[in-house]
Image: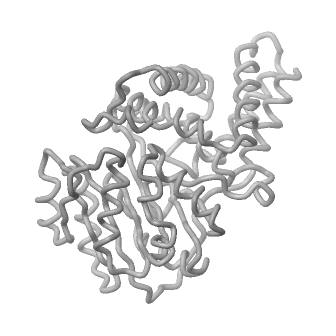
């Protein structure tokens, strides 16, 4: 009984606030540069640019940074009329994505920089809404957006608990959001005024970090820059690790343990308590009687409030929380072992072990 109560209280505590992007309607006259770091992204890049380049905006500049790709990434960028540049050879102390972003920023002319992963795509007027929002925050601000996750297979939905932990750790969902503040950021979509970016020394200042978005947000906060984080529902979308269990495992294991090491101690403790209480409650579900069933449905429904803003989860997906939790625990252990004990860690054909 007490396990159910603690699990319920922690669920409400951690997932109280909604996370959808604010409703922005007005248009801005601020110029902006969309910088897309791309390594072997010909298929994703074609989907993104096919819509982005058709929607003409004279205030918008699109820069694709080809990060030593082995496929037609560069040719696709040229085909659709984007400004295509080749990233110089990767220096030893740099992570690939940060290096590509940094070189793209050096070529950008927009007042606002919008760093965007190649495996995303925009909803209608998405770029304009993003830029208009950062205009309302003032020039000393950093905005990160977690793209709305479209899922077409069961394997992709195994990301559910990872998403929940990422959002709660960011500080934007807990009931004490006003006092805790934003604790981090999201990597696929990041906006910042160009002048502010260079004041922070850009990606050069976080060149060795695997979880670059978290490090960038922390650095901005340390310099008095306001940080904001939201879900991208209705703004920007993605499909993570499509239809492949192996891709889900490799993708999350790359960064999750590394991100956990950098997370806020307060939010880490809160998440550990939540995960422990909920896991204990779920494993003892049969022993608690019909009250446990009521608690199980309450927790599932409450989590669905957040899940439906993060991705294309259905109401019945929330009832599979025990399955998602088991996957989360197993993969988190695997990720820790890789992070701390593995001699080799690869991502997109590059060894990143010496930069952990």
**Could you tell me which residue is drawn at 73 percent across and 24 percent down?**
276
Find residue 291 and report its horizontal and vertical position in percent: 84, 22
The foreground one among 239 and 95 is 95
- Decide: is 319 above or below 127: above
Find residue 35 and report its horizontal and vertical position in percent: 33, 66
**Could you tell me which residue is drawn at 36 percent across and 38 percent down?**
241
Find residue 121 and report its horizontal and vertical position in percent: 35, 59
The foreground one among 309 and 315 is 309
Left or right relative to 194: residue 120: left
Kindly give the residue lying farthest to the top in the view shown: 287
Q: How is the image coloured?
A: one colour
- Decide: is 356 above or below 108: above
Q: Quadrant of residue 223?
A: bottom right
- Quadrant of the frame with the C terminus: top left
The foreground one among 177 and 352 is 352
Find residue 151 and report its horizontal and vertical position in percent: 42, 42
- Quadrant of the frame with the N terminus: top right
Kindly give the residue lying farthest to the right in the view shown: 2
Left or right relative to 33: residue 50: left
**Could you tell me which residue is drawn at 36 percent across and 29 percent down?**
345
Count of picture labels: 0
- Decide: is 231 above or below 31: above
**Could you tell me which residue is drawn at 43 percent across and 30 percent down?**
154
Kindly give the residue lying farthest to the bottom in the view shown: 29
Q: Quadrant of residue 6?
A: top right
The foreground one among 2 and 344 is 344
């Amino acid at each position: 009984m007490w396990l159910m109560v603690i699990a319920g209280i922690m669920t409400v505590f951690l997932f109280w606030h909604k996370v959808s992007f604010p409703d922005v309607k007005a248009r801005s006259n601020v110029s902006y540069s969309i910088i897309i770091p791309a390594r072997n992204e010909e298929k994703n890049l074609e989907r993104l640019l096919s819509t982005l380049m058709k929607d003409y905006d004279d205030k918008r500049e699109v820069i694709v940074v080809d990060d030593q790709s082995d496929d037609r990434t560069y040719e696709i960028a040229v085909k659709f009329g984007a400004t295509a540049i080749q990233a110089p050879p990767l220096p030893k102390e740099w992570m690939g994505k940060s290096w590509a972003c940094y070189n793209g920023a050096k070529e950008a002319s927009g007042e606002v920089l919008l760093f965007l992963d190649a495996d995303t795509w925009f909803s209608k007027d998405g770029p304009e809404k993003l830029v208009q929002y950062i205009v309302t925050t003032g020039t000393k601000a950093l905005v990160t957006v977690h793209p709305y996750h479209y899922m077409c297979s069961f394997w992709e939905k195994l990301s559910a608990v990872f998403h929940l932990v990422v959002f709660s750790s960011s500080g934007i969902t807990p009931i004490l959001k006003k006092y805790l503040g934003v604790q981090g950021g999201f990597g696929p979509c990041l906006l910042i005024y160009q002048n502010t970016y260079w004041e922070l020394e850009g990606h050069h200042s976080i060149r060795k970090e695997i979880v670059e978005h978290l490090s960038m947000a922390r650095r901005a906060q340390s310099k008095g820059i306001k940080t904001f984080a939201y879900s991208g529902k209705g703004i920007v979308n993605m499909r993570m690790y499509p239809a492949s269990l192996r891709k889900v495992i490799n993708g999350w294991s790359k960064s999750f343990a590394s991100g956990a090491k950098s997370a806020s101690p307060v939010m880490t403790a809160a998440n550990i308590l939540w995960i422990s209480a909920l896991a204990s409650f779920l494993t003892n579900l049969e022993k608690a009687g019909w009250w446990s069933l009521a608690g199980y449905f309450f927790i599932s429904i409450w989590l669905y409030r957040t899940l439906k803003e993060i991705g294309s989860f259905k109401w019945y997906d929330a009832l599979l929380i025990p399955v998602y939790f088991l996957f989360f625990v197993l993969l988190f252990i695997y990720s820790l072992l890789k992070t701390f004990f593995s001699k080799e860690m690869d991502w997109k054909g590059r060894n990143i072990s010496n930069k952990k």
